[in-house]
Amino acid sequence: GPAVDVVDTEADARAPEAEDAAPPAEVPEAPAPEGPPLPSEHPAASYTLHVNGVDRPVTDAWIGESLLYVLRERLGLAGAKDGCSQGECGACNVQVDGRLVASCLVPAATTAGSEVRTVEGLAVDGEPSDVQRALADCGAVQCGFCIPGMAMTVHDLLEGNHRPSELETRRALCGNLCRCSGYRGVLDAVNEVIAGREAAAEETGSGEPEEPRIPHQAGPGAGSVQAHQQDGGMA
C-alpha cells in the first residue's frame, strides 16, 4: 500500500518537467551534391536551314519539330501543306539535296546544312515556273490544296527524266493525292511542259533542255546545329 503511493507521487511530480522539456533541435539536411543537368523532355537547338538559296536561322526550336512545321510556322513558308502528317498524301513534298521528301516526316534539324527547295523556290523573278503555269492551264487546279506538292513532284520528275512516259509520270505521282480534278490534267500538264522545253531547246540549238540534276548530300557537321545547355547535348 504505502510504497505504491510514494512511487505514484514521485511520478506525478516529474510529469510537469517532462511536459516543459524543449523538443530536440532539428538537424538540417545536407544539400544534395549538384550533378549534371537532367535532359529536358523537349530539348531545343538552334541551326540554319538553306532554303531556296537563302540561309534561314532557326532559334530555340524543339529538335523533334518536322521540316514542314519549321517551314510553315517558323519561316513563314506556307506553300507546303499539312494534309495527313503521315507521309501519305504528298501535299508537303519538298526537295532536300535534290531528293523529293515528305517534309512532315523529316526532322528539321537533320536538314541543317542541306539544300532545301520548296514550292516558293520554283518561281523565277516572281513569275510562276513552266510547271506551275501548265498545271493551271491544263485544269489540274481545283481547290489547290494538293498543287504545291504536285508541282514539286513534277519538277522533281522532270529534273531527272526529261521525257518521262505516261507510265513513269503516273508512278511519280502515285504518292500525291488529289480529291478534286483527278490526274488527267496533271498528265496533260507534264506533256505540255515537255513539249515547251523541247521547243525552247530547239530554238536555242542546245538540243537538250538541261542536264539532269544530280542530288548531293551535305557533309558531316554542316548546318552548325547547336544544342542548348538544358538539353544535355541530345541534339
Image (tube, rainbow, N blue to C red):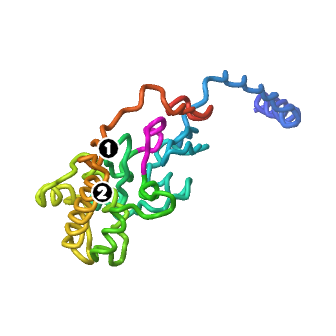
Q: Which residue is mark 2?
A: 200
SS type, badge 1: strand
**Quarter of the N terminus within the rendering:** top right
Q: Which residues are magenta?
A: 107-117
Q: CA distance from mark 1 to mark 2?
A: 26 Å
Local crowd size for mark 2, using a 10 Å CA cut-off: few (<14), some (14–19), many (≥20) = some
SS type, badge 2: helix
Across and down, in percent, residue 159 comes to 28, 48
**Quarter residue 58 falls in:** top right
Of 207 and 211, the residue lying toward us: 207
Left or right: residue 40 versus residue 136 is: right
Of 150 and 227, the residue lying toward us: 150
Left or right: residue 131 versus residue 188 is: right
Count how many numbered circles sit on residues in the image: 2
Across and down, in percent, residue 177 comes to 25, 66
Q: Mark on residue 210?
A: none
Q: Is residue 92 magenta?
A: no
Amino acid type of the residue tagged 2 in the rendering: Ala
Taking the image as drawn, is residue 77 in sight?
yes
